[in-house]
């Protein structure tokens, strides 16, 4: 039987590097939960938010985690060079930034299949790879930090605890702050940017390499260069958008027909209400349950800007 070459050891960890690895575990843990929740919200304007969509997103996340844990452990046994791990995290960050631009065409293409399979396919294409790359962090860091068998239990427990606390922070952040206040595209870009910063910090501080830092600058510039994908304003052929904003219920919009004959209230691209400006009548009494600022926008005879609408919150 062919003997496997011994794993390439990483130099002894300094206390500073050890703390940096703990920070990396926390941030990747937070990013995994943010991507899991945000992924479903990004798909919802195109495939809805039925139980099929959430089932697909959770299933893809679990399979990605399983794959990432396995590959991360095997990779760490072969070589404990941290550079490989941080390149994987950087790859996940770049892929997540790209999902903002490709989410809509991928989702619409997957709708050619039935909803159950299409939502699973869309979630897999968009989020399996970055989640699997991020999941490699845990087993890889356990192998790197553990210098003797006697310390395995403590290191596994410590890293798992830190990663889980990071996941908790990410869950609270995405649920109570990021989704209600920011477009989903911005949240995904910021998540990718944080992962890039973690990688750039490692390469710049502990490896004295500038190439990854340049990748970070280029990726961030390319991402924010696609202004149409940032979610600030929609462009339509038959209507003009008067308002767009995020909320606890998803993306909210008010659009008006080009001839001014009708206005529509949309929630994740689905029409929830219509309003006739001439008769000043809302289509049905469900409007009584809409937020007051949206009714004000719907009934306004002026053309409110997004900043004006937001100031009414």
Image (cartoon, helix red, strand yellow):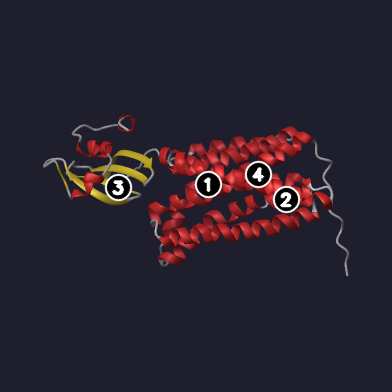
Find the distance from the CA under tag 1 to the CA under tag 2: 23 Å
Please state, as top left, top right, bottom left or bottom right, where the N terminus lies in the image.
bottom right
What residue sits 52% from the left and 52% below the top? 36
Residue at which label 3 appears: 266
Name the secondary structure under disc 1: helix
Q: Are marks 1 and 2 in contact (CB under 8 Å)?
A: no
Can the viewer see residue 157 in this picture? yes
What x and y, as percent, mark residue 12?
Answer: 84, 41
Closer-to-camera residue (165/170): 165
Placement of 237 over or under 51, stated as above or below: above
Q: On the picture, is 46 further left or further right than 188?
A: left
Q: Residues within 10 Å of mark 3 (few under 14, many from 20)?
A: some
Residue at which label 2 appears: 156
Name the secondary structure under disc 2: helix
Q: Quadrant of residue 83?
A: top right
In this view, the residue farthest toward the left is 279
| Count of numbered badges drawn on the protein | 4
Q: Nearer the viewer, mark 2 or mark 3?
A: 2
Q: Quadrant of residue 260?
A: top left
Placement of 214 over or under 133, stated as above or below: above
Dot 1 or dot 2: first in sequence order is 1
Find the distance from the CA under tag 2 to the CA under tag 4: 10 Å
């Amino acid at each position: 039987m062919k003997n496997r070459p011994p794993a390439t050891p990483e130099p002894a960890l300094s206390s500073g590097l050890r703390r940096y690895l703990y920070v990396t575990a926390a941030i990747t843990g937070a990013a995994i939960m943010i991507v899991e929740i945000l992924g479903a919200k990004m798909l919802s304007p195109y495939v809805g938010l039925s139980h099929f969509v959430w089932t697909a997103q959770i299933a893809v996340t679990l399979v990605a985690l399983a794959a990432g844990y396995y590959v991360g452990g095997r990779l760490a046994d072969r070589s404990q060079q941290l550079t490989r791990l941080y390149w994987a995290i950087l790859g996940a960050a770049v892929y997540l930034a790209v999902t903002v631009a490709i989410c809509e065409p991928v989702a619409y293409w997957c709708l050619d299949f039935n909803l159950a399979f299409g939502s699973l396919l869309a979630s897999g294409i968009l989020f399996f790879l970055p989640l699997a790359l991020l999941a490699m962090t845990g087993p890889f860091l356990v192998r790197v930090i553990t210098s003797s068998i006697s310390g395995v239990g403590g290191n596994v427990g410590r890293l798992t605890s830190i990663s889980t606390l990071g996941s908790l922070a990410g869950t609270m952040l995405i649920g109570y702050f990021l989704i209600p206040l920011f477009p989903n595209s911005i949240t995904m870009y910021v998540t990718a940017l944080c992962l890039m910063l973690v990688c750039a910090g490692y390469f710049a501080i502990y490896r004295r390499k500038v190439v990854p830092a340049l990748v970070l600058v280029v990726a961030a510039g390319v991402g924010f260069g696609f202004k149409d994908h940032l979610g600030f304003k929609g462009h339509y052929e038959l209507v003009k958008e008067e308002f767009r904003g995020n909320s606890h219920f998803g993306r909210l919009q008010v659009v008006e027909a080009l001839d001014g004959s009708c206005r529509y209230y949309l929630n994740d691209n689905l029409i929830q209400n219509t309003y006739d400006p001439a008769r000043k009548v809302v289509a049905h009494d469900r409007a009584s349950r809409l937020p007051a600022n949206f009714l004000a926008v719907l009934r306004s005879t002026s053309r409110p800007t997004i900043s004006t609408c937001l100031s009414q919150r």
